[in-house]
Amino acid sequence: MTTHVLFFASFLLLPLFGLATWRLEAVRRMDLAGRLAVAGAAGALATAVVMALLSLVHVQWSRTVLFWSAAAMLPLSIAAAKPWRGSHAAAIQSGDSRRRTPGLVILGFAVLTCYGILTARESAGDLHFFWGPKGIHFYHAGGIDVPFLATKTNPNSDYPPLLPLLYAWAQTVARQFSWWAAVLATVLFLLGSVAILRAFSGDDDGAVLLMASLSYAIAIGFAAGGADPPLVLFETLALCALVFLDDARSRDVLAAIGLAGAAMTKVEGATFVIAVVLALLIVRREVKRTLLIAAPAIVILLAWLAFLIANGLIFGYGGAKIPVHFSALPKTLALVGKASLYELYGLPWLAPLVLLFLGKRRAVLPLLVVALTLCATVFFYIHLEEPSWWIAASAPRVLLTPLMALVVASVAASERRRPGG
């Protein structure tokens, strides 16, 4: 029991390493849940980057090394933060029953998700096949385990390392790997995504819609414990910052953190970065600012690719050399369309689409991201002449990104006040 508690608690410590985000004007005006979610995303990225850098300079991880690394990060993070204040935060905690009801509904979905996870109904097979084993090997090696990755016995061994690094961080704290805590961490990523949308947009109903959509889709897609929930957390942060925040500094910094975290989490994260960059260039036509926002993600991606090339680990990224089978396009579209129904007649998509038609405010950018990520998904699948098994195994999880972006678009179409704007 102690192992499970300590492993899970290590994820609860991550916001401590992201408190510097509280210095941003927009974040200071958010409610506590939103501030913690933003700090948690930033802290997860900071922890993974520090661990990766330690590994690159051949400093083996240990409780002592990571303790002193955390001890160095924490004072800087706290010193950079400013005291929490803001009229919106006070309003959130004033006991307003109108705000309390959506929070209870969100909590209800979180409880259902916990039930599904703890009864082994939502666990990701990928957790057991490669995310978990990677984290365990990294922990025992005291760094990114190149020989283990080079064996090619671990599927997707060249995937970006953020989640295995966080699992190795948690195992360093707990001394043992906890499969139960690993899947339960999904609830934290899910709640973080919802808290970010709610805090950035001020839309309680939109937050409930996102919670209902993602929690159901995660259950149908068996995503708990895999990299898709943390990927969606970073993507939600980036997209909500770009859509809802008017303060340029806050918008650019938080979007950069979100894009960098996405790029460091999954190959699909790089696709999301490209989609956001293209959407920004089309909608806002600010080349310099767009490149600055994407720069941390580009640096992380290039650094990871350089590491893979230097160690002969290019496997999945080499898939670009595989020929595209346009003959598979009709079948791929049909199968992706079937997967997108989520065994509920497509309701997770229909609800935000109905809301979207009620207005068009600020919705263009996230809608472009929806379209681009859907096109990228289909493009990846037609690299196989017979993609049925691949679509069945991954589409419900991969579609979490455009689904989240569609909900954000539907919220952006409303005229609600944005407390973080």
Image: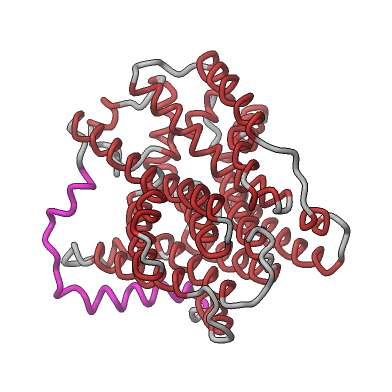
Total of numbered circles in the picture? 0
Identify the residue shown where x is 57% and y is 77%.
413
Q: Is residue 132 left or right of residue 323?
A: right
Q: Is residue 157 left or right of residue 84?
A: left
Identify the residue shown where x is 18% and y is 73%.
328
Q: Is residue 159 left or right of residue 259?
A: left
Q: Magenta region, mostly helix, strand or loop?
A: helix
Q: Quadrant of the C terminus?
A: bottom right
The coloring applied to the image is secondary structure
In the displayed structure, 71 sits above or below 387; it is above
Q: Percent position (x, y) of residue 361?
A: 55, 77
State the extent of the magenta-drawn residues as a range. 315-344
Q: Percent position (x, y) of residue 100?
A: 81, 63
Of all residues, the one furthest to the top in this rendering is 64
In the displayed structure, 370 sits above or below 393; it is below
Residue 341 part of the magenta-drawn span = yes
Q: Percent position (x, y) of residue 75?
A: 63, 24
For residue 411, what is the image quadrant? bottom right
Decide which of 133, 90 is in the foreground and name it.
Answer: 90
For residue 209, what is the image quadrant? bottom right
Residue 186 part of the magenta-drawn span = no
Q: Percent position (x, y) of residue 357?
A: 54, 86
Identify the residue shown where x is 77% and y is 51%.
86
Decide which of 167, 267 is in the foreground and name it.
Answer: 267
Residue 61 visible in the picture: yes
Q: Quadrant of the N terminus?
A: top right
Q: Is residue 137 left or right of residue 193?
A: left
Residue 11 visible in the picture: no
Identify the residue shown where x is 40% and y is 47%.
126
